[in-house]
Amino acid sequence: MEYFNPSGFCLDPCRGAGAFYDALPEPRDWCEIEQGRDFLTYEPAQTISWAITNPPWSAKEYRPIAQRCFGLADNVVFLVRLHNGLGTTARHNDYRKVGHRIKEIILCPWEGVGFAPEGFSLAVIHWQKGWQGDSKWTYWPELASEPAPTTTFSSPLNKGGRSDSLVIRPRTQIFEPAHDLIVGDSALKLKELVADSVDLTVTSPPYDGLRTYGLSRPEAINHKPLHERERPAKRAFNYNFDFETIARELWRVTKRGGVVVWVVGDQTRDFTESGTSFRQVLFFKEIGFNLYDTMIYESEKPPLTHRRYEQKFEFMFVLSKGNPKTFNPLMEPCTNAGQVQTRRTVRNTDGQLGGFQQPQPIKATKIRGNIWTYDTGARAGEDKIAHLHPAIFPSKLAEDHILSWSNPGDTVLDPFLGSGTTGKMAIKHGRRFIGIDVSAEYVEIARKRIGEAASAQRPARKIGLIKSIIINEHFLPRIAQDQDRRKGRL
């Protein structure tokens, strides 16, 4: 604990005999299934800054605990056999999908730690959400008080030469691509995401069949450069979607304090609007979301009819799972900045008029209102490839919501990926992105756009050099007891 120096709310998800929990600073909490506090159903009272534990090492028990830790905590520290945390692609995907990165791996000797020696490497692994620095490999020397000459190895697991201190040759970081794009039905694919793993969703579902979408079989994708292709054939297919399943899955995958921005409009048919947007937002409230704000997306649209006032807006419903944990307000200039406001009349709760008697200086900026106006189409300056999709919303709209409701390193989701506008803006601003769309052809368009944004943002990252570290030994026998007890349970 002295090395990691955790702060904020800390949790030991697998308390056992209390080896880690007893060393955690306040505020802290614990889970232990044998004491009736199952971590897999645990609902934290506040955001978890650190989850530090010695989890079960069996494949049956380890992975669900790891997945939930990555979904809930900003920092995760496990004492495990190295292959538990890093042994398969699936294990890497568990933390990559929610924006965590490996910050450090500390290789530990088996001797003197209370475990029966095994052929696997024992390690302390530290994952941190949004980590952008080097991934360090560190060795716990048997004689930490005696500095040892360094020896260079091509692999941190190499047993040759001195093992007191290792230096890894710098090499390109091979972990964690910046985004995941998935072809499939969102109602099904969302079920594959880890619960409590998404910070922000910005999406715009199909509006009551207002567009005819094309769909190509994956094997029939046109491999010409995208900007040279003809527009995808408007070959009608049923683009209705299982709204209620998707809404429930969005609730499940959204973190406590996370936000869903649902951009939607209604169809007018037989002289009446469908009202679908209202039914959808009421269902979101029914399953637990707060309707945090009803915002308006205003734009100039082509005239459709002269029998009513022309349509110029769509809804942007801002839904939150509890109180939003992030709000970075966008500011705009005040019209009368620099002037002094001598009196402002207000209406009191009793209906009487009141006002400020003291002069009030007008600030230079103020928080934007909740009606946002954007150019669309060619006037919005979108890249040409985006227009291969029949219904795109402005990049600036997605960008403004991403900046408002998330921070760098957060995970952003779009279950109706389309041309990839949300993904492009998420990557541009250092967010992790997951996109899903039923159309393989549109996913390819999105892959092109997001790939360009990722290439512009991707830094050259290398694995750093090794340093020595001392680990407190007093809790190690208690950890060994926990693992022996869990083996007996299995």
Image (cartoon, helix red, strand yellow):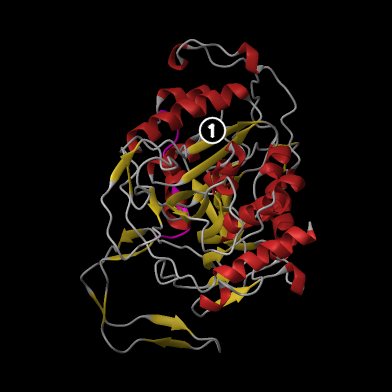
Point out residue 11 in the picture as x, y percentages from the top left corner. 57, 70
Determine whether the residue tagged by mark 1 lies in a helix, strand or loop. Answer: loop
- Decide: few, some or many residues near mark 1? Use Cα within 10 Å; few <14, some 14-19, many ≥20: few
Name the quarter where the N terminus is drawn.
Answer: bottom left
Q: Which residue is at a point 50% across and 54% down the rendered structure image?
A: 123
Give the residue number, with chain letter if any, for mark 1: 303
From this view, report whether residue 123 is shown above or below residue 413.
Answer: below
Q: Quadrant of the rendered structure where residue 310 is?
A: top right
Q: Is residue 381 visible?
A: no
Q: Quadrant of the rendered structure where residue 171 is?
A: top left
Point out residue 53 in the picture as x, y percentages from the top left corner. 57, 64
Name the quarter where the C terminus is drawn.
Answer: bottom right
Q: Is 399 included in the stretch rendered in magenta?
A: no
Comparing 60 with 352, the one in front is 60
Viewed as shown, does residue 440 lie left or right of 124?
A: right
From this view, report whether residue 485 is shown above or below residue 456.
Answer: below
Comparing 391 with 411, the one in front is 411
Point out residue 177 in the picture as x, y percentages from the top left corner. 47, 37
Residue range (magenta): 368-378
Amino acid at circle 1: Pro
Q: Which residue is at a point 54% across and 16% down the rendered structure image?
A: 231
Q: Quadrant of the rendered structure where residue 376 is?
A: top left
Point out residue 43 in the picture as x, y percentages from the top left corner. 67, 68
